[in-house]
Each structure stands twice: as C-alpha cells, then as structure tokens.
Image (cartoon, rainbow, N blue to C red):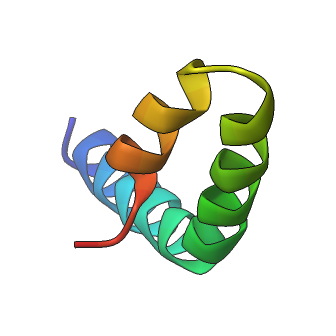
C-alpha cells in the first residue's frame, strides 16, 4: 500500500509540473477560443495563472 501512495504523490507532482509548464499554452489557446466560442471565456478563467 505504501509504494502505491508514493506513486500517486509522484504522479500528482508530475501532473502539477506539466500543468505549470503548459499554463502559457493553455492561456494562449483559451484566448484563441474566445474569438470563436463563449466556452473559451470559462477556459481562460479556470486556467489563467493567479
């Protein structure tokens, strides 16, 4: 059970790191979506860095 918990922690840290690295790309894609659909507004609000 302990190794599984450690693996989950490592995976979560990697996912957070990937999200942090791709935040600029997400914001850029959200701004592009804003021009076409209203859904992009919610995406930009949720994925924009604080």
Q: Residue 48 versus residue 3: which sits nearer the camera?
A: 48
Image height of 24 relative to 25, above or below: below
Image height of 13 relative to 11, above or below: below
Q: In this view, does 23 lie to the left or right of 49?
A: right
Q: In this view, does 22 lie to the left or right of 20?
A: right
Query: Dividing the picture into quarters, in which one does residue 25 lie?
Result: bottom right
Query: Dividing the picture into quarters, in which one does residue 5 lie?
Result: top left
Tell me where residue 14 appears, x and y as whole percent.
50, 66
Image height of 10 relative to 7, above or below: below
Q: Residue 48 versus residue 12: which sits nearer the camera?
A: 48
Q: Is residue 15 left or right of residue 40?
A: left
Residue shown at 33% from the left, 41% from the top? 4
Residue shown at 76% from the left, 38% from the top? 35
Tell me where residue 32 appears, x and y as whole percent.
78, 49
Q: Residue 49 versus residue 37: which sits nearer the camera?
A: 37
Tell me where residue 24 appears, x and y as whole percent.
62, 75
Q: Residue 16 versus residue 35: which sits nearer the camera?
A: 35
Q: Residue furthest front?
A: 35
**Viewport quadrant of the C terminus:** bottom left
Tally of numbered discs: 0
**Viewport quadrant of the N terminus:** top left
């Amino acid at each position: 059970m302990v190794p599984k918990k450690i693996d989950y922690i490592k995976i979560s840290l990697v996912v957070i790191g990937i999200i942090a690295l791709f935040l600029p790309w997400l914001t850029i894609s959200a701004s592009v979506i804003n021009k076409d659909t209203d859904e992009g507004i919610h995406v930009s609000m949720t994925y924009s860095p604080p």
